[in-house]
Image (spheres, grey):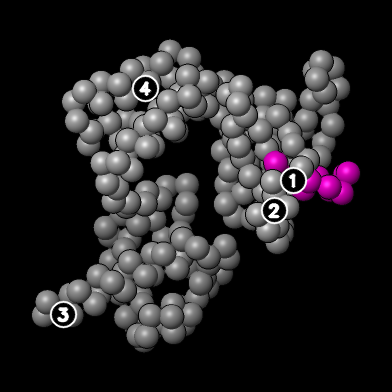
């Protein structure tokens, strides 16, 4: 019984990871082949995953993971937690959105009291200086497109804000500058090259129903 339960636990983890890393979803037969079981077992396992809170849905015969509502389970050592807190501190002072606030709140619950107090002070700062709601929406749209390898159509303002131009961009990365602002690095179809776009100048972002091949690491870091 113990071995059987262990095998099913490992299979559930494998299915969850397969769906997480699939951009287009997977059919039951594909999951069955990948996990070495029949389709009936796959359906039972997917049902159990849904029962325990993994947001899986079916569309056009393929199973998908709802990434917007998905919460990954990650085990971190004390040193890994501390490293994340230290790296998050500069970002928290620049107000990069409510998701950093919630992440810091979750991390602080499992830290020693002295470090928890420091993390809580960062949370309080982000709450006093929230990111503009429209910028949060832009960041979320671009981040999900980046994760799904989908291009986005952005409305980009000139430096003085007087002119707006639409651009279709394939996100390669979202990075924070040394000054604390966020920027999008991506392939711009208008200029046919990789460019840097300052997030505060992106007024709107719309995900497009298309895909693209990601560049290698060197290309992504050479705008």
Instruction: Name the disc covering residue 136, or none.
Output: none
Q: CA distance from mark 2 to mark 1?
A: 7 Å
Q: Are marks 3 and 1 in contact (CB under 8 Å)?
A: no
Return the residue at label 2.
218
Residue furthest out toward the right: 191
Q: Nearer the viewer, mark 3 or mark 1?
A: 1
Q: Residue 168 at x, y = what percent?
A: 79, 45
Q: Earlier in the sequence, mark 2 or mark 3?
A: 3
Q: Earlier in the sequence, mark 1 or mark 4?
A: 4
Q: CA distance from mark 1 to mark 4?
A: 34 Å
- In which quadrant of the rendered image does the C terminus lie? top right
Q: Is residue 34 above or below residue 155?
A: below
Return the residue at label 4.
123
Image quadrant assignment for residue 8: bottom left
Q: Is residue 62 above or below residue 205?
A: below
Q: Earlier in the sequence, mark 3 or mark 4?
A: 3
Residue 193 colored in magenta in the image: yes
Q: Are marks 2 and 1 in contact (CB under 8 Å)?
A: yes
Q: Are marks 3 and 4 in contact (CB under 8 Å)?
A: no
Q: CA distance from mark 3 to mark 4?
A: 43 Å
Q: Residue 52 at x, y = what percent?
A: 26, 58
Residue pictured at 78% horizontal, 30% vertical: 156
Q: Earlier in the sequence, mark 3 or mark 1?
A: 3
- In which quadrant of the rendered image does the N terminus lie? bottom left
Residue pictured at 21% horizontal, 23% vertical: 114
Residue pictured at 47% horizontal, 19% vertical: 93
Residue 167 visible to an observer of this rendering: yes
Task: Depth check: give the residue in front, 51 or 8.
Answer: 8
Label 2: few (<14), some (14–19) or many (≥20) C-alpha neighbours in 10 Å = few
Q: Which residues are magenta?
A: 185-194
Return the residue at label 3.
3
Residue 47 visible to an observer of this rendering: no
């Amino acid at each position: 019984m113990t071995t059987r339960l262990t095998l099913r636990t490992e299979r559930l983890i494998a299915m969850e990871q397969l769906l997480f890393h699939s951009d287009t979803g997977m059919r039951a037969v594909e999951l069955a082949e990948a996990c070495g079981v029949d389709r009936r077992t796959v359906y039972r396992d997917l049902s159990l995953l849904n029962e325990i809170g993994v947001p899986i849905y079916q569309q056009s015969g393929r199973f998908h993971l709802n990434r917007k509502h998905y919460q990954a389970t990650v085990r971190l050592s004390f040193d890994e937690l501390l490293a994340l807190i230290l790296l998050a501190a500069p970002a928290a002072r620049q107000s990069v959105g409510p998701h950093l606030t919630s992440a810091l709140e979750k991390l602080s619950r499992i830290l020693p009291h002295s470090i928890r107090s420091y993390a809580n002070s960062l949370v309080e700062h982000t709450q006093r200086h929230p990111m503009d709601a429209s910028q949060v929406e832009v960041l979320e749209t671009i981040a999900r497109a980046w994760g799904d390898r989908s291009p986005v159509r952005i409305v980009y303002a000139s430096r003085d804000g007087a002119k707006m131009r639409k651009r279709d961009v394939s996100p390669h990365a979202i990075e924070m500058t040394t000054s604390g602002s966020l920027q999008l690095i991506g392939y711009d179809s208008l200029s046919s090259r990789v460019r840097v776009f300052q997030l505060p100048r992106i007024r709107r972002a719309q995900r497009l129903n298309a895909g693209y091949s990601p560049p290698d690491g060197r290309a992504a870091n050479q705008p």
